[in-house]
Image (spheres, rainbow, N blue to C red):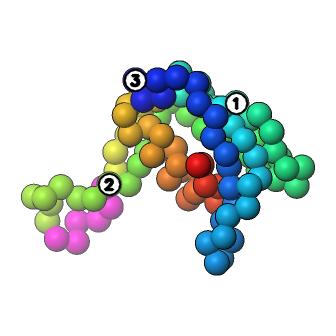
Amino acid sequence: MAPQLARVYDLYLEDEDEDETLVGRVQLDAAGQLTLLEAEAEHEGLIEDAVATVNGQDVLVSKVPPPADAPEHSGTFSKTVSRDDDDFVPALQAYLKTYYGLVLG
């Protein structure tokens, strides 16, 4: 199971210079569910939305490189990542950054 134990993560917003600002903290439990522990007031709505959206999904979809035998220019490949998958935390990190601009660290 990927998130073996409950773990607390800091959440950062990354600006255009790739500087990170701490905006909150979440806990990822053993079932792969997030709990908002604290948030800067101006970013609380964004983080609450991200937590609710992630917790409402059964799986995350992660982009992956094409298999070695894939035809050239064959498009984007993806992998469905369940909460008990070893790749769940990296998929969660990519999801939060892509859709919310949040860095889970």
**Would you identify the image quadrant in which residue 12 lies?**
bottom right
Work out whether 41 lies above or below 73.
above
Q: Residue at x 85, y 50 (%)?
A: 40
The residue most toward the right is: 41
Could you say which quadrant of the image residue 35 lies in?
top right
- Range of residues picked out in magenta: 72-77
What amino acid type should be assigned to the residue bearing mark 2?
Val
Q: Is residue 93 left or right of residue 49?
A: left
| Number of the label disc, if any, that sits on residue 35 | 1
The 10 Å Cα crowd at callout 2, few under 14, some 14 to 19, many 20 or more, is few
- Tell me where residue 93 appears, x and y as whole percent: 52, 49
**Mark-to-mark CA distance, 3 and 2:** 21 Å
Q: Position of residue 70 (x, y in %)?
A: 15, 60
Q: Nearer the viewer, residue 63 or 40?
A: 40
Secondary element at image label 2: strand
Which residue is found at the position 59% from the left and 30% from the top? 7
Residue at position x 37%, y 34% from top? 86
Which structural element holds mark 3? loop
Q: How many marks?
A: 3
Q: Residue at x 73, y 61 (%)?
A: 21
Q: In front: mark 3 or mark 2?
A: 3
- Residue at the spot of label 3: 1
Q: Residue furthest bottom?
A: 17
Q: Secondary structure at mark 1?
A: strand
Residue behind mark 2? 64
Q: Mark 2 and 1 residues: CB-CB less than 8 Å, in contact? A: no
Label 1 – label 3 distance at C-alpha: 18 Å
Q: Is residue 72 above or below residue 98?
A: below
Mark 2 or mark 1, which has the lower sequence index? 1
Three-letter amino acid code of the residue under disc 1? Thr
